[in-house]
Amino acid sequence: MNKDRFYFLLTEYLDGHLDEDLELELKAEIEQRGEDVNDIDGLKSLAEAMVNWKVPEPSEKLKDNFYTLLADEQQKQLADHQRKSVQHFIEKFNTKVWLPRLAYAAVFLLLGYIVGQRISTDSLEYSRQIASMTYEMQQVREVMMLSLIDNPQAAERLKAINTSQYIQDPDEKIVTALLYTLNTDPNENVRLAAVDALLQFSGKDEVRQGLIQSIPAQSTPMMQIALANGMQAIDEKDAVPFFKELLQRDDLNDLAKNKIEETIQILS
Amino acid sequence: MNMLKLTDNELMMKVKAGEIARLGLLFERHHKLLFGFFYRTTAQAELCEDLVQNVFEKILKNRTQFKGYGKFTTWMFTIARHELADHFKKHKRRAETTQVDIENEVGEVEPGFFELEQKREELKVLEMAFGSLDEEKRQLLALSKYEGMNYREIGEVMNCSEGNARIKVFRAMQELRSKYQKIEKQVLS
């Protein structure tokens, strides 16, 4: 057996990838070389034990630092683009205006038209790039938000919800995640933050419906009051039957009861 | 376009084309992997975070050099290795350990290895043995056993052939076991 084949079998064996036939081939070769088969088994046990060595999680500071770096770089990129656009325009303008000294007035008129078109095109391109970068940043924020919202720590979930305030037009995944948090999160502060976040997107029908549907599911006065305030703020008349259903509950706190009655009156 | 469905290479090609916000998703996908690599090589969490940040800074600065032929992670770990080498060079730390008696060998272990508490005895011995390996062997084993790289990719990162990568990883395992046995013997005696 050549050297390459021997080390191929050895490493594959340590990684647990060899079938029975190849393992027999390897062990026969080890014996033929006058070496101890037990050594390779010892190495395999060690390789298996290594799996148990876990490393700690990096701190949040790492994420913060990275996103600061990215934001700085984007600012630089934007500033650079603006500078180049201005330079480009000035160069074009100088060339077109000062070189044809003997040009007729009509040429200047035509030139004015061309420059006007150029400014308009540059401005359109600039706007397009801004829109594209804004869209990308929104997607990054969505990824951050979705990666944090399942975190076992309430502070991290709060951070996720706070991130959503920078998302202008959330997609279905974000709305679903926020509604799921509103209805199931064990921490009241997180649920309250979810109400605030969802109210920002109340222009979406699925958000309004989700908020309304969650009214009967809320069992704490704070959440009931927050939803009552929210429904008033967005003038959601369809919430009235759900608040009436809530009023039937025996365990309703007086403060919450008064707020709900007031909300029903305002919305009706 | 759903950004989440893009491969690492597709994302990096977009970063290269100027859409630098896409690096955020690559960071989300790989920063823990990179942190793990540095931690197993240095065992100092704070330093590892700095090194991860430096790697992503280099990726951003050198984005136009990404060709997209190999895997993004292979390129990332190549930068990580250089970053580690620069760090040790700057801090004039000796990257290689020497064959001395066990007391001295243990003395070469990074301080962080001793600070890991409440772990099983065997795992502690393993960590100490790992920490006493030289720089290259630690990197080889970290890439092979923890970062899920195949030997061709390890070869690319370590600048050698796949066959050589297999030999080096196997020898690193042999040395790790030898150090493990020595430390275990010392602990038990």
Image (cartoon, coloured by chain):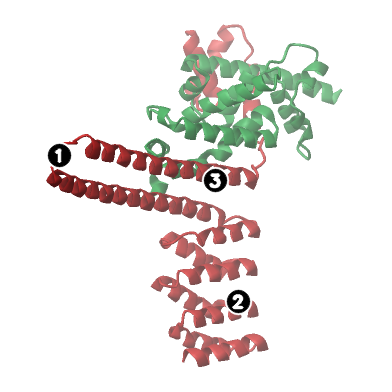
Chain colours: A red, B green
* Quarter-of-image position of residue B89: top right
**Reading the chain from its start, which is encountered first: label 3 or label 2?**
3
Instruction: Give the residue drawn at x 15%, y 47%.
Output: A110
The crowd level at tag 1 (other Cα within 10 Å; few <14, some 14-19, many 20+) is few
- Of residues A121 and A105, which is closer to you in this image? A105
Does the CB distance between marks 3 and 2 fall below 8 Å? no
The three-letter amino acid code for the residue at tag 1 is Ala
In the image, residue A82 lies at what x, y percent? 39, 44
Instruction: Give the residue drawn at x 44%, y 72%.
Output: A202
Q: Secondary structure at mark 2?
A: helix
The three-letter amino acid code for the residue at tag 3 is Tyr
Q: Please state, as top left, top right, bottom left or bottom right, where the C terminus of chain B lies in the image.
A: top right
The answer to whether residue A267 is seen in the rendering is yes
Q: Tell me, for residue A17, which label it has, or none.
A: none
Q: Which residue is mark 1?
A: A103
Check the residue under mark 1 and report the chain it is in. A
Of badges 3 and 1, the one in the foreground is 1
The three-letter amino acid code for the residue at tag 2 is Met
Q: Which residue is mark 3?
A: A67
Q: Which residue is mark 2?
A: A223
How far apart are the alpha carbons under marks 3 and 1? 54 Å
Check the residue under mark 3 and report the chain it is in. A
The crowd level at tag 3 (other Cα within 10 Å; few <14, some 14-19, many 20+) is some
**Vertical relation: A176 (above or below) A97:** below
Q: Is residue B150 left or right of residue A53?
A: left
